[in-house]
Amino acid sequence: MGIVKIIEVIASSEKSFDDAVQNALKEASKSVKNIKSIYVKHFNANVENNQIVSYGVNAKVSFEVNA
């Protein structure tokens, strides 16, 4: 097994928390290979006129690097 590194990412969606997590993974995978897991650290939402208008997550993405 190689070394596992962790980065923290922030992502959002206008659809759902699940979609925000998917967006985090999609964006991280553009520059990081060998992703092994994603851990959602915080959830948040923006509200206007008593309606949620966007969903956000702070997530930790772990990936293996070759040593």
Image: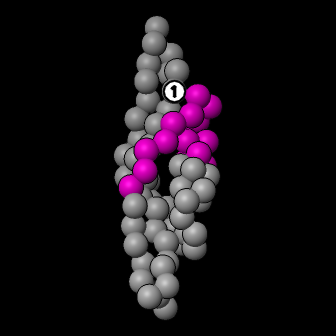
For the C terminus, which image quadrant? bottom left
Query: Looking at the picture, does residue 33 appear above or below residue 21?
Result: below
The residue under the point 60% across, 56% down is 30
The picture places residue 16, in percent across and down from the top left corner, at 58, 35
Residue that mark 1 sits on: 54
The picture places residue 10, in percent across and down from the top left corner, at 43, 44
The picture places residue 37, in percent across and down from the top left corner, at 51, 67
- Number of labelled discs? 1
Query: Looking at the picture, does residue 45 appear above or below residue 4?
Result: above
Q: Residues within 10 Å of mark 1 (few under 14, many from 20)?
A: some
Query: Looking at the picture, does residue 2 appear above or below residue 15?
Result: below
The residue under the point 42% across, 78% down is 4
The residue under the point 43% across, 50% down is 9
On screen, residue 20 versus residue 2, left or right, reads right
The residue under the point 50% across, 16% down is 51
Asked if residue 18 shows in the view, the reply is: no
Looking at this rendering, what residue extends furthest in the top direction? 49
The picture quadrant where one finds residue 35 is: bottom right
Does 38 lie within the magenta span?
no
Which region shows up in magenta?
Answer: 8-23
- Nearer to us in this view, 35 or 42: 35
Does 10 lie within the magenta span?
yes
Asked if residue 24 shows in the view, the reply is: yes
The picture places residue 3, in percent across and down from the top left corner, at 42, 83
